[in-house]
Image (tube, coloured by chain):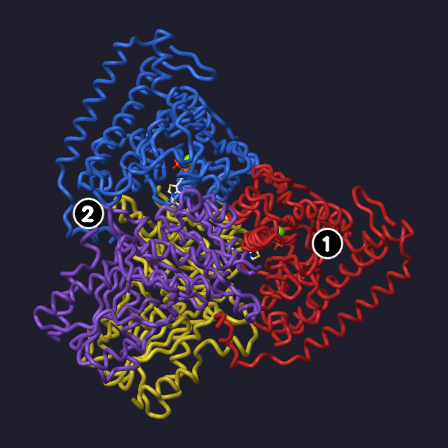
Chain colours: A red, B purple, C blue, D yellow
């Protein structure tokens, strides 16, 4: 058993957090390589460095809870249960992709597991998660709508209107702001006079919590409490996860003109996976060997997924205009 | 058959659907206790309460986005804009999200979302309360657009809109809301994509929508006195658009005029004209003509406002001009 | 001289505040009558009960400062220097109206005096005032952009995006929220969990001040300080004026289904004009006779304006499509 | 004459205008130090600093509204959307405010506002980064819409847009940005409403815009080999639309095809077809035809994406079909 403020975790749960973060990390690393190799036809925004957020939150969710995400959504899809094979196949434009090749990196849909979509447009996920909360409340279900979005999105009108409506109607919704300090190359400190996103919750009369987004146990604890509140009719919570993307905004983009190598290095030293590794080994909850075994298993899983994806067929051009309408 | 107003007929349709399906809810400003600025929901709050008749903050983008998410997760939202002008603040949610998600999800997510609002020029509502914008909605794949012109159509098309799993724009012309017409007791729905032949005739085909159907029927009545026989076609929905009914009529008359209150350029008349010229070139004995409202923001002052919309006289003149071709 | 916390006013200034409030009050009362008489073709949202806000703020503004307003804008136009005749003529749809009959109640334009427009759409005035501030800052002018809007508008995305941008760029702008507790018939207490609009300023890192919107001297003091700050490069301020409209949302609308007669009566007892009248007479700054003379003068001014307006011609239908483009 | 890319030519035009008028400023995400996602402003931040090259928060509605207010008060804003798709969140500010305020103020307020963005389908940008939407802008009175297809036009039309006192949409197709073409040293501007005859021919008139001009010229070149003479007309602006140049061509050829990458219904082809039918009915020897991209959201996967846009082969086929009529 491991004890961190406000949370008790059994070994299996913690090791699963570790595994899930690795799934994202290795999958993203594979995608970055695939991008270099020309297998990815469009954009590719990796989640490397931010894995603890998606994993810490989604560990509490079932397939019936609805997640809505944004352009940096691979991690959310994987943490919600989309297979690495389906994510990679989607970015490779294959019919076996989670969106059957229609979407690519910024349009990942897997309603079967409650991954209700990522969006190339910044903002809408906040409103749609509130809407899922509205459905669940109206239908009397104890499910929750969860939005993942960046610091940049918190300056968009959708944030204001979405959080306000979720607040006044006590909707079962979670708003997870991944504050990685930049929107593309624009620093959040430039785009907002008050860089404490969590403080904005007060304007809407709902709880706002800031948490170390690189500490998966801390995220897990905060998200768990907010979800208990939401499921029991206590309304929405805004959670600001302070984190950092250690790769450029998108693959193929230059980096560093707007941030220093020193800053990047400092954050790499706070790598969420390394942090958990240290905690687990120092607290004696898992041995290095155990963890290495997990790493090897995940490596194999990603390798298989990659093979599957790149050997999958492209969709049939004749289907390009299918599914525009329900009938 | 019993007579009722356009608004009452539409509200009866809404009430029937809300009674049969508890997943339906309505959002909008003043659609709760107040019953709607245009009485679209009068009496329903008392039956269904605040979750199913939900008053909103002034957050048009927000509640369209919220209802998009709701439609994706098991409920069937109806957004009541009061004036459709206010939808312009929500176009991103409508075009980039609601209209595209069925497609992007390969049909695994449905989008049962109705967006209703009052359209049209009149009563010095001025430029922020006189918009229609339907040709814009028709341009976007993934959307349906219904434009009833009678109480009968209002009820039948609204019920179809509510039962549809696609996002539907349901647009009600303000000057029609108090018009009375026959509405049967027994239940009915009107499928999308079926035009109504509002009046049969031999000499010329006039396609008109919403209020312009009424104006064109008046014009046709007057012209009948001079022995001119006008066929009036009301598409009722422009997405989908029933071109076949129009083609059959043009095959008979050889002449086509489209009367539309809204802006001409890239508008409904252009699309109808382009399809007819493509598909019925040899049937045409004269140029296809369009009569539109002026291509201008809508002014407030009565004489200015009257000058920017077609009326019975200008319709009559346009028909005479076309027959003279 | 009169002394209220943070403001010293000479008699002429105070009497002018009194006069300006009367101009609005009598003009609105005349318009309400005209509406009954069928002289007003479209909507008419009166400002009765809220006069202290427009007057207290605009008393500090010159024609070079830019005011942007909303559907309830008669008071702002009058306080900014549009004549009652031009306002009434506009609502009567006459060519002598401030918008030459194109606009009516919700589209009042008089750039000559810095009245840059009212809008039938709630929200845009906030953004446009920030934009005026941007112009003035770029051009190195000490002018200010001012937005007047309601509590309902504070839940619109335009509020969030506009205040945030004005904050980060230190724009010379003033955001005046007229919190009259209702948006049409929807209570602000329903539409927002936190009904203290001024508190939202903290989220943007700018000053937010709440003031008694029925006390013209208090509004004058708070606005003066905010304007000094804005003109000297100190950036924008959000001012929440707590006030009340004592007439229905718009003329011809029923009232009271959403608020009690007792509530309306209580606010009428705090009538801003009566309050100033009492202050002036009890503090001996002006006699009842002096004030009565002003009242008579304003009555006459409104009567003349009304005659002018209702005897003015309608615009020529041939001009309906003029001015769509600049050339 | 010197050659430069579309992007370089447009940027030269912007730089020239910013140098001559200090009231001009640009807002957008990453248009400051970064120089723009599409290098639209590269090098200008160093010259003019953060007030005239202003990076913004992700507040599209907000900065369009802000720039509307700025344009009303003495400055000349340019909104750089990077992808025009993002303008959909600002439609309310654009249609209800920027487009209407000159009119509502009886011409006493001007609206010198440029809104630029990349359009078009390609490179698996998928449905949120492939939009064009120009027929929608053309429907709205008060707006101008420019669609350059060459570096020369990009510079000349952008300078006209910046000098205009009207709100102008300046739309740059992503697949054209790196195309090179001749651009003179000496200054020039291109007036709005003047189509370019991109290729003269006798047998058929093809109207095309933006990237489709290039594709149609390729098709015309190939058809020339078979002795088919195609006249290619590039309107360059669709609001205003130079119908006369099109009419003259149709008078000569008697056949008209409109090739447009964007959605067919209520689109550019519909408007051009409707005007030609109305004004040149007797000149037409065959139906007016439209070749459009599929009426669908834009898919990501290369084979799907390729299937939803016209290409040289489909254009050739459409021309042959029309000539066979
Ligand atoms: C409405 C909209 N505007 C602009 C963009 C272009 N864009 C894509 S990602 C991005 C930055 C997003 O920053 P943030 O929300 O902090 O997320 P992060 O990339 O840092 O994870 C921008 C501006 C967009 N996709 N949508
Ligand atoms: C975007 C938009 N949505 C809805 C309306 C309809 N409407 C007109 S006034 C009003 C209430 C405004 O309330 P508030 O902002 O508090 O101003 P107040 O009328 O109380 O002065 C509404 C909802 C509108 N004009 N614009
Ligand atoms: Mg970020
Ligand atoms: Mg209010």
Instruction: Tell which subunit mark 1 falls on.
Output: A
Name the residue nearer the viewer: B85 or B170.
Answer: B170
Give the numbered dot on residue B302: 2
- Kindly check if marks 1 and 2 are in contact, taking CB atoms under 8 A apart as contact: no
Instruction: Residue lying at the far bottom in this picture: please name it.
Output: D226
Residue D89 falls left or right of residue C29: right
At which x and y percent is residue D286? 26, 85
The residue under the point 39% across, 21% down is C216
Residue tagged 1: A60
Residue B114 vs residue B89, the one in the foreground: B114
Quadrant of the snapshot with the C terminus of chain C? bottom left
B69 lies above or below B166: above
In-image side of B91 versus B109 (left or right): left
Above or below: residue C302 compared with residue D219? above
Tell me which residue sits at (23%, 82%) in the image: B251
* Circle 1 residues within 10 Å: few <14, some 14–19, many ≥20: some
What residue is at 53 percent from the left and 77 percent from the top?
A: D304
Report which quarter residue B276 is drawn in.
bottom left
How far separated are the C-alphas under marks 1 and 2? 61 Å
Left or right of residue A323, residue B295 in this image: left
- Using residue A228 as the reference point, say whether residue D289 is left or right of it: left
Dividing the picture into quarters, in which one does residue B136 lie?
A: bottom left
Counting from the top left corner in percent of width and height, residue C126 is at 42, 40
In the displayed image of the protein, which residue is found farthest to the left? B226
Q: Residue B150: percent from the left, percent from the top? A: 29, 61
**The disc numbered 2 marks a residue on which chain?**
B
Find residue D121 and report its horizontal and vertical position in percent. 48, 70
């Amino acid at each position: 058993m491991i004890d961190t403020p406000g949370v008790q975790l059994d070994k299996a749960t913690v090791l699963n957090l570790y595994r899930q973060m690795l799934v994202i990390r290795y999958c993203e690393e594979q995608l970055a390589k695939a991008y270099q190799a020309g297998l990815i036809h469009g954009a590719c925004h990796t989640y490397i460095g931010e894995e603890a957020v998606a994993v810490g939150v989604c560990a509490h969710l079932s397939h019936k809870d609805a997640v809505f995400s944004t352009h940096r959504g691979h991690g959310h899809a994987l943490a919600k249960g989309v297979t690495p094979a389906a994510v990679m196949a989607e970015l490779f434009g294959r019919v076996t992709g989670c969106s059957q090749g229609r979407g690519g990196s910024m349009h990942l849909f897997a309603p079967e597991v409650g991954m209700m979509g990522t969006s190339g447009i910044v903002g809408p996920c906040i409103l749609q998660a509130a809407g899922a909360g509205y459905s669940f409340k109206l239908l009397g279900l104890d499910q929750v709508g969860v939005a993942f979005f960046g610091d940049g999105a918190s300056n968009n009108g959708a944030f204001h209107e979405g959080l306000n409506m979720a607040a006044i109607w006590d909707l079962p919704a979670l708003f997870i702001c991944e504050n990685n300090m930049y929107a593309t190359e624009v620093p959040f400190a430039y785009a907002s006079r008050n860089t404490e996103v969590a403080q904005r919750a007060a304007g809407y009369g709902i709880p706002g919590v800031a948490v170390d987004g690189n500490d998966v146990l801390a995220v897990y604890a905060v998200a768990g409490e907010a979800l208990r509140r939401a499921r029991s009719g206590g309304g929405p919570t805004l959670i600001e996860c302070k984190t950092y993307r250690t790769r450029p905004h998108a693959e193929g983009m230059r980096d560093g003109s707007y941030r220093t190598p020193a800053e990047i290095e400092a954050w790499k030293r706070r790598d969420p996976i390394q942090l958990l590794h240290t905690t687990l080994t120092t607290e004696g909850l898992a041995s290095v060997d155990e963890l290495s075994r997990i790493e090897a298993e995940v490596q194999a899983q990603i390798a298989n997924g990659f093979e599957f994806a790149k050997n999958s067929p492209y969709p049939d051009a004749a289907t390009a205009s299918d599914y525009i309408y329900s009938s | 058959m019993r007579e009722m107003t356009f608004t009452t007929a539409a509200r009866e349709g809404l009430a029937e659907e809300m009674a049969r399906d508890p997943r339906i809810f309505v959002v909008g400003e003043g659609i709760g206790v107040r019953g709607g600025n245009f009485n679209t929901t009068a009496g329903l709050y008392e039956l269904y309460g605040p979750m199913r008749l939900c008053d909103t903050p002034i957050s048009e983008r927000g509640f369209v986005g919220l209802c998009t998410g709701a439609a994706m997760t098991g409920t069937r939202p109806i957004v009541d804009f009061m004036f459709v002008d206010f939808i312009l603040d929500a176009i991103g949610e409508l075009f980039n999200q609601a209209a595209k998600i069925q497609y992007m999800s390969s049909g695994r997510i449905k989008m049962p979302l109705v967006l209703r609002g009052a359209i049209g020029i009149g009563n010095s509502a001025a430029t922020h309360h006189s918009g229609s914008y339907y040709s814009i909605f028709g341009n976007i794949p993934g959307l349906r657009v219904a434009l009833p012109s009678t109480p009968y159509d209002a009820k039948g098309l609204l019920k179809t809109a509510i039962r549809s799993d696609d996002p539907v724009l349901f647009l009600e012309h303000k000057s029609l809301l108090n018009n009375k017409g026959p509405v049967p007791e027994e239940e009915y729905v009107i499928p999308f994509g079926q035009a109504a032949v509002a009046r049969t005739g031999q000499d010329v085909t006039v396609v008109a929508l919403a209020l312009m159907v009424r104006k064109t029927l008046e014009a046709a009545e007057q012209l009948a006195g001079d022995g001119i026989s006008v066929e009036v076609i009301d598409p009722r929905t422009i997405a989908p658009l029933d071109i076949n009914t129009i083609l059959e009529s043009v095959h008979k008359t050889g002449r086509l005029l489209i009367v539309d209150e809204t802006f001409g350029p890239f508008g409904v008349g252009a699309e109808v004209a382009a399809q007819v010229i493509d598909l019925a070139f040899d049937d045409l004995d004269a140029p296809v003509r369009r009569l539109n409202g002026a291509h201008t923001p809508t002014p407030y002052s009565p004489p200015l406002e009257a000058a920017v919309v077609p009326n019975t006289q200008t319709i009559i003149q346009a028909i005479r001009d076309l027959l003279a071709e």
